[in-house]
Amino acid sequence: MIITIPWLKEHLKTSAKENEIIDRLTNIGLEVEGVKENSGEMGKFKIAKVLKAEKHPNADKLKVCDVTIGGKEILKVVCGAPNAREGLITIYAPPGAIIPKTNFELKVAKIRGVESKGMLCSESELNLSEESEGIIELNNKEKEIGKSYFKSSSQKAIDISITPNRADCLGVRGIARDLSSAGVGKLIHINRKKIKQNTKHQIKTSITKEKNQGCDIFGSCYIKNITNKESPEWLKNKLIALGLKPISAVVDITNYVMFDLNRPLHAYDADKIVGNTLTIKQAKQGENFFALNGNEYELDQGMLVISDERGVDDLAGIMGGERTGVTEDTTRMFLEAAIFDPISVANTGRKLNINSDARYRFERGLDYDSPDLVMHYAASLVHKICGGTCSKVVKYELEKDRKLVCFNPDSTQKLTGVKIENEISKTILEKLGFIITDNDGEWDVTVPS
């Protein structure tokens, strides 16, 4: 699990320094494996202006550009982009920068006899999109020449080893909760995002009643009239800090929520769903599934899937389907958040040899109370960034009793040899979300979802 300190502090009010936080993480069992600058030291990529662009003396398709990053020095850069021109504001990578797409470290080099100090970058080279025809064109950035393009460049990415029993810490908020319980600040309350629910839900869901059904909760929301555009800088920078490639606003929002709140989501293009009903059921032997990773899989009887009238759209808890995936042309979307059986997800993932961030979380178990919260949260982000109007969140849910543990606080010392005052134990547990009822020294402890 990778986090950054600024992102952590969106959930944890603390004055602790980076080193204090790293030490405390290891002390509470969340071992820090490494700390590094994110995404190939992205702070080296500067906003620059092309002062002059002339034809290369020895190559018809190359140009020699005079580039400034705000100082007195004029940098000579050889560039093959057709849109390189005088006055263009773009992104400059100096010698020593590592290009994210290729992991190639730039050096001063002679290109057809002309020395080039660095390069001017395309979106593809920075893993911002697939666009590779020309270098990036930045509008209204004249006053930012010389500044780092990636605002999060000073952030360090902290890589934390999460053991299988700590599924609650596979999101930034879970880690913040643990640090809060250890006295490193106060967990910031999440205000439930309100969305205007002023359109009718157009996609129905049906859960087939079968033995070992595998789906306990299924929440969904329908959003129409969206514009699935490029994500805003804050969102792209968060994903880049984790080593992820921004794709589009809708996809980036689902990835952001997964790492922020440990809650995988899946978005469908509603116009590509055949019929008006998605069915959660067990696959038939030999059914085919075309996944978002570009591969086709033959399914076994009993694998949990989500299907429309044409066939399988989603391998539940593991990966969405290519046919109904969102694109930049998506205008109507169906967003789902579910709780799938961990054993079912693990068995299917192993049989088909599919690994994904969603599978990693589902097979370790998710917060039963999370779907309703995150559906409103994600839908509000879609509305804010992409526009559109939302339906009500529709939720199917099996009844699940809260787990109650009878606990004698004196047993802590008997089991560990360490004396911990009852009030301290109570404080730690309550900061983690446990509810305690004292019955003459014995505690009835309700375990948080």
Image (cartoon, rainbow, N blue to C red):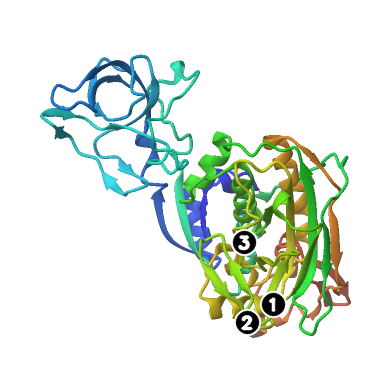
Number of numbered discs: 3
Is tag 2's residue or tag 3's residue first in the polypeptide sequence? 2
Taking the spot 76% from the left edge, 72% from the top edge, the residue there is: 215
Where does the C terminus fall, quadrant-wise? Answer: bottom right
- Res 402 label: none
Taking the spot 56% from the left edge, 59% from the top edge, the residue there is: 292
Residue found farthest to the left? 113
Image location of residue 89, percent across then percent down: 40, 21
- Res 283 label: 1
* Secondary structure beneath label 3: loop
* Secondary structure beneath label 1: loop
Crowd rating for badge 1 (residues with CA inside 10 Å; few <14, some 14–19, many 20+) = many
Image location of residue 149, percent across then percent down: 43, 31
Image location of residue 443, percent across then percent down: 82, 75
Q: Are marks 1 and 2 in contact (CB under 8 Å)?
A: yes
Q: Is residue 334 left or right of residue 160?
A: right
Instruction: Name the residue that disc number 2 marks.
Output: 300
- Res 321 label: 3
Q: Is residue 240 shown to the viewer in this render? A: yes
14, 296: nearer the viewer: 296
Amino acid of disc 1: Ala
